[in-house]
């Protein structure tokens, strides 16, 4: 589907919302970076065995949400400002996710621990008062 990329669409998405969610997740995680090209609507529909209109609705929603840009003849690409996080943070999050999977940790536990760390880091330190 995408040369050089390890990007898979989940099995059996039946509606445009699941296709939208999949690509949104890839963009948010940094697995699809700014300027990278998505497969054509026709190719996505063919790969998934769905109607092109279903894939087109997902792509249109991605575009409306500012995650991708589309130009006739140039295809659909990830928008420059699509990811709200710096690349270095995305890389670290991916490393954490990979470690959690290797350790068979429940995602809820990892998210709870991450939230606690973020909360603790944002509390002003009272050391010098």
Image: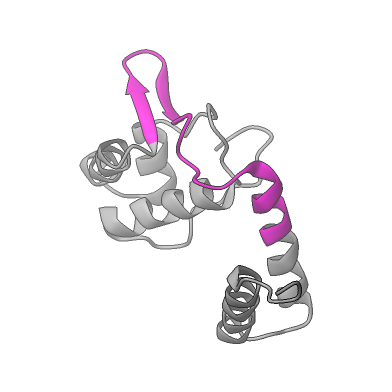
Left or right, residue 51 beside residue 66: left
How far across and down, in percent of the image, does residue 102 sit?
Answer: 78, 76
Quarter of the rendering occupied by the C terminus: bottom right
For image coordinates 64% across by 82% down, the residue present is 113
**Quadrant in which the N terminus appears:** top right
In the rendered image, residue 59, in percent from the top left (x then y), is placed at 31, 39
Task: Find residue 86 and report its horizontal and vertical position in percent.
Answer: 62, 43
Q: Is residue 27 left or right of residue 12?
A: right
- Looking at the image, is 58 positioned above or below residue 94? above
Which residue lies at the image location 71% right of the left edge and 51% below the top edge?
91
In which image quadrant can residue 92 be found?
A: bottom right
How far across and how far down the image is residue 41, in percent?
A: 35, 34
Q: Any magenta on residue 78? A: yes
Q: Which residues are magenta?
A: 68-93
Q: Residue at the location (56% across, 47% down)?
A: 85
- Residue at the front extreme? 129
Task: Give whichever of 54, 94 is nearer the camera.
Answer: 94
**79 magenta-colored:** yes
Q: In this picture, is 30 found above or below 69?
A: below
| Model colouring | one colour
**Above or below for 17 versus 52:** below
- Closer to the camera, 106 or 5? 106
Q: Is residue 36 left or right of residue 125?
A: left
């Amino acid at each position: 589907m995408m040369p050089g990329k390890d990007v898979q669409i989940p099995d059996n998405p039946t509606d445009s919302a699941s296709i939208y969610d999949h690509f949104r997740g890839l963009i948010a995680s940094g697995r699809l970076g700014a300027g990278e090209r998505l497969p054509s609507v026709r190719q996505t529909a063919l790969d998934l065995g769905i109607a092109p209109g279903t894939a087109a609705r997902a792509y249109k929603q991605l575009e409306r949400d500012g995650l991708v840009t589309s130009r006739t003849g140039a295809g659909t690409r990830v928008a420059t400002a699509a990811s709200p996080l710096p690349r270095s943070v995305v890389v670290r999050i991916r490393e954490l996710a990979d470690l959690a999977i290797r350790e068979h940790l429940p995602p809820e536990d990892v998210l709870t621990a991450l939230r606690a760390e973020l909360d603790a880091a944002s509390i002003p330190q009272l050391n010098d008062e």
